[in-house]
Amino acid sequence: METASRDWRTAIPSENADRRVLDEFVQRTKNASTEVHRVHGIKESIKIILDIANGMKAKTVVAVPGTLLDESGLIEDLKHAGLQVFTSKEDIASHVDTADIGISEVEFGIAESGSVCQHATEAVSRLVSSLPPVHVAFMKSERIVTGIQDAIDILSKGFDSGYVSWLTGPSRTADIERVLTIGVHGPSRFILILVDEAGGKGVQ
Amino acid sequence: MAKKRNLRKEINEKLHDEVLRGALGRFAEAYPIARAKALENVEDVEALRDQLKETKRYAVDHIEEIADRFEIEAVKRGAKVFRAATGKELISYLINLCKERAVRRIVKSKSMASEEIHLNDALEKAGIRVKETDLGEWIISIAGHKPSHMVMPAIHLNRYQVADYFSKELDKSIDPDIAFMVQTSRTTLRDEFLKADMGISGANFGIAESGTIGLFTNEGNARLATTIPPIHVVIIGYEKLVPSIKDTVPILRLLPRGATGQLMTSYMSMIAGPTPCLVQKNGRWEETLKELHIILLDNGRLAAAHDEKLKEIYQCVRCASCLNVCPVYALVGGHVYGGQTYAGGIGAILTAFLGGMEEFEQFNELCIGCRKCVTVCPGKIDIPGLIEELRRRSIKEKGLPFIMSRIFDVMSNRRFFHGLLKAASIAQKPFTSQGLVRHLPLFLAGMTKDRSLPGIAAAPLRDRVDRIVKPIEKPDKKVGFFSGCTMDFVFPETGENVIKVIQDLNMSVSYPDRQGCCGKPVAATGDVEYTKKIAKNNIEAFEAVDVEVIICACPTGVEQIREYPHLFKDDPEWRDRAQSMADKMKEFCTFVAGEYEKRGRLKKAVKSHNPLKITYHDSCHLRRVLNVHDEPRKLIESIEGCEFVEMKDADKCCGMSGSFGVKYSNLSIPILKEKMKNIKDAQAEIVVCACSGCMVQLQGGIDQQAPGLKLKHVADLLAEHLESKNGG
Ligand code: SF4
């Protein structure tokens, strides 16, 4: 399963996204109430996460590290900073309902709608991005496509089985008197960290 | 059998429901702005809508093939697929499954299809605990209501009412604070998610080539319902299937924008086959493969797919844009303007084939035919057209009610009908008090509060034309004039002005006396035979005069006469004769603007010192059937001494629309009131329109609500200008 649907990710453009496309993407993610940060190398994000954690007196983090986080040592840093971080499937399953922060990685962004696309076949990736009140997602900043059409073009090259989610801002409802209220069943804060990879691959 | 409804009573209740009126009124204001904003970064909206329409058209024409492929692919990936012909079949499949897997608790994310078959009731009767998890759905489920809107099911309730229902459900006092109530539902339903044995979801689309289903939600409940419980059941109607993932593009781009004015909902998920899930066994978490069941629901859909006209419903993506712009929905909401499950005009159509014609017949008349919905529907569904089609069928099946057939006898007998109208002008009072008169053209209906209805003119146009028509030596064109009955009997002066304007172009005018009603009031009820009779009479009348062009200054007449060839599609002789009349038919403003343009007369007049302020009301049919927008405005602007001012929502219905205005006068009047407010706010001295139906309605509104204001047809304005020019 995992292998079958991994294919589409190879279709994501890895060259630098156009500056305009990136700007548009950032603007639209913000319009959708996503909090966007841009870091140079993943280590830079430790401060952001710790600020968030301190601000909400967070104790527990559940994380599904992918290739970005695996190499970065970020998880270790968070543990050193005193946070309890769970990363195994079993641990996530037992703690995700009470965890303060969920961390995951997302594959690419869509400028047209300010969405990010998550490879979500593993249940844990959906759990950490759904149940805790705060979800922090990491994404390589060059991985942005212009339109929904482009996004579907990518998925059409190999999304054959499994689960894919597009995330566009935090969970929301307007079901009572059409008053927009954030954080119904999913997170009330969605924080996107755009990573310019060390080695200068980021968008200038 | 559908329960007999008392629509008039229901309407009156809702018109007095302040909560509902407030909520719907505010929404009707906010929605068009939000939608337009969301579409700002779509380059070609029309092309995208066409793409959605074509995609769905292809799907419906190949539905069996696509459904087979969907099933094969889903099964290949490990899903179980069940095809339910009816709601009953679906329910028994599901209850069996629950028994086999010892399912006691279910969480549901939104599925209209499950509401259509009353699934929750059935499951609860079988002793299974079912919780809706979409906040709006949860609210109405604890309130015991049906959804009043497809996207915002609880839009009819305010925070205080919701707090009451919450308090009862949770057995403690809940403050009417929206943020707090949302948090309360989060904690209450979180527990339900964690304990559920099964999650049920709907689907916004299904992709055949990979057996994938797609889901949009904002709250995130669908992701949880499809992630936490070990069994996931999808209920999907056949109309949601498309061949390939590329076909989802127009849905992805249009559905959220139209539904909520968002560029994308917070969550959009695609699920292809079962995925791993985590279950607790003996205190330990283990990963297993989820059990995925996909139920394809027919319940009338496959039959509709093979119906040349009704198959259009496959183009519906349930975005509710059509409700959001509907003037009738905005007044009474979906509980009155709707069937058991689906609201509004599209609701009437869906009800016809899901709930049956009887239920359709009880509320379809609330479609005023203004066609605003057609301009926003992502699938470009001709909602009013389909409703008319269904009306026609119901009449074909049952025949006209006796009283209506008597009236149509009268209307299709021109001489007698006209005699009757003339008699009415002399003795309006006693005539109008008879019950039968309600069904005759509207101007016979008498007076109502907030709107007077104009009387019949002492001398109809047909008796005046001889005085106006003058011989023209070498006419540029020979023009026939089709007036339609309202202009003939209620606004004969306007008819005279039409003639004057045409003659001023050095064109001759013939007004065949034999012409009668265009037939629209009859056609609207769905009666084809009487409509044909009326059409034949008009075709013959205009064959008897030698003209190149036929002018009509009322959009309904133009539209109806252009329909004539379709009436005779199985009768080649009459079809050709009808076609030749239809080909000559030109709408007044369009024709005159074109001729003025050729003669260099359509220029903006020079600004004058103290101009007469004029505003323009777009008739629904002129604007949205004939697509005329610029011409009348340009004609107004060409007149010296005038200043054109645009009013707010100029193309919003005035509330007339044939017999609707009379039969549902309690709905027609508030729509007119809003129109009158917009006219007054434009601060014009004259309101101009180009439709005699609208003139009836607007004149009534002016009499009662703005006595200082003047109403004119574009023809009146032009003719008066000619006279003042020639006279001075
Ligand atoms: S008919 Fe058109 S506008 Fe109405 S719900 Fe369906 S797709 Fe949306």
Image: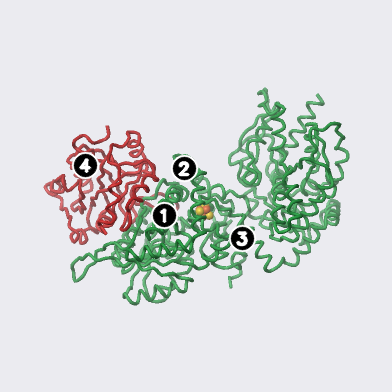
Q: Is residue A155 above or below residue A204?
A: below
Q: Give the percent coordinates (x, y) of residue A37.
A: 26, 40
Give the labeled residue for mark 4.
A48
Output the letter for the chain in red. A
Badge 4: residue crowd in 10 Å (few <14, some 14–19, many ≥20): some
- Mark in the foreground, 4 or 1: 1
- Mark in the foreground, 2 or 1: 1
Q: CA distance from mark 4 to mark 2?
A: 34 Å
Give the labeled residue for mark 3.
B364
Closer to the chain start, of discs 3 and 2, is 2
> Tag 3: residue type?
Asn
* Chain of the residue under label 3: B
Output the letter for the chain in green. B
> Tag 4: residue type?
Ile
Q: CA distance from mark 4 to mark 1?
A: 41 Å
How many circles with numbers are drawn on the protein? 4
Say if labels 4 and 2 share a chain: no
* Chain of the residue under label 2: B
- Could you say whether the residue bearing mark 2 is in a helix, strand or loop? loop
The quadrant the N terminus of chain B occupies is: bottom right
Give the labeled residue for mark 2.
B39
Q: Give the percent coordinates (x, y) of residue A139.
A: 26, 44
Q: Kindly identify the residue that appears in the image at 56 percent across and 65 percent down.
A: B353
Q: Kindly identify the residue that appears in the image at 62 percent across and 55 percent down.
A: B385
Closer to the chain start, of discs 1 and 3, is 1
- Mark in the foreground, 1 or 3: 1
